[in-house]
Amino acid sequence: MKPVDEYFINQKEPFQSIMLYVRSVILNTLPEVEERYSYKIPFYNIGKKPMIYLNILKGKNYVDVAFVQGILLENDFPILKNDNKRKQVRSIQLKTLEDLDQENFVQLLHKASIVLNKSKKAWFI
């Protein structure tokens, strides 16, 4: 079993269902995305550049769907929040599956992909 699959299987509900659903939306929306297991969490890269990662922050009761270059997306997608005062990462916090607006999320994925492809590097701050 791949480490990323093991990561998902070891999550408690409702986090496991949320993460598996978000994963399927990402992989179905952006076939060019490569799923990796880095820093003990799942990352979704385009080329070698990380675009999104999924995480459950300690002491929080939500899945953090974090966009590496989220600072460049937050004006068009106000759902992105600056949690934990991160410099460039912005994220969507999901407590339930119903918290995800799939249509808006798909648009966000496409825009994030375009932004990442135009940038010279993923982590720029």
Image (spheres, helix red, strand yellow):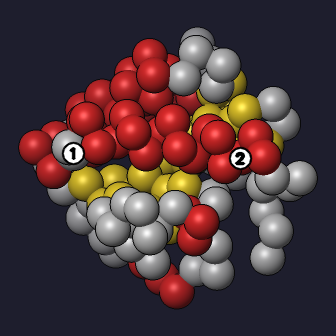
Residue 37 appears anywhere in the view = no
Say whether marks 1 and 2 touch (CB < 8 Å): no
Among the 4 quarters of the image, the one containing residue 60: bottom left
The residue labelled by disc 2 is 116
Which of the image's four quarters has the N terminus?
top right
Instruction: Give neighbour class at mark 1: few <14, some 14-19, many 20+ (Cα, 10 Å).
Output: some
Whether residue 68 is situated above or below residue 34 in the rendered picture:
below
- Which of 53/90 is in front? 90
Q: Quadrant of the C terminus?
A: bottom right
Q: How many marks?
A: 2
Image-based side of 11 in relation to 90, left or right: left
Calculate the distance from the C-alpha at mark 1 to the C-alpha at mark 2: 22 Å
Q: Secondary structure at mark 2?
A: helix
Residue positioned most to the right: 120
Q: Is residue 125 left or right of residue 14?
A: right
Q: Is residue 121 above or below residue 104?
A: below
Question: Is 75 situated above or below 54?
Answer: below
Query: Which residue is depicted at the point 62% across and 39% down?
Result: 113
- Left or right of 106? Residue 29 is right
- Of residues 27 and 42, the one nearer the viewer is 27
Q: Position of residue 5 (x, y in %)?
A: 51, 23
Asked whether, in this view, residue 63 is left or right of residue 83, the answer is: left
Question: 71 or 65: which is nearer to us?
Answer: 71
Q: Which residue is mark 1?
A: 100
Instruction: Give coordinates of residue 42: x percent, y percent.
Output: 58, 39
Residue 28 rendering spot, x and y as whole percentages: 44, 16
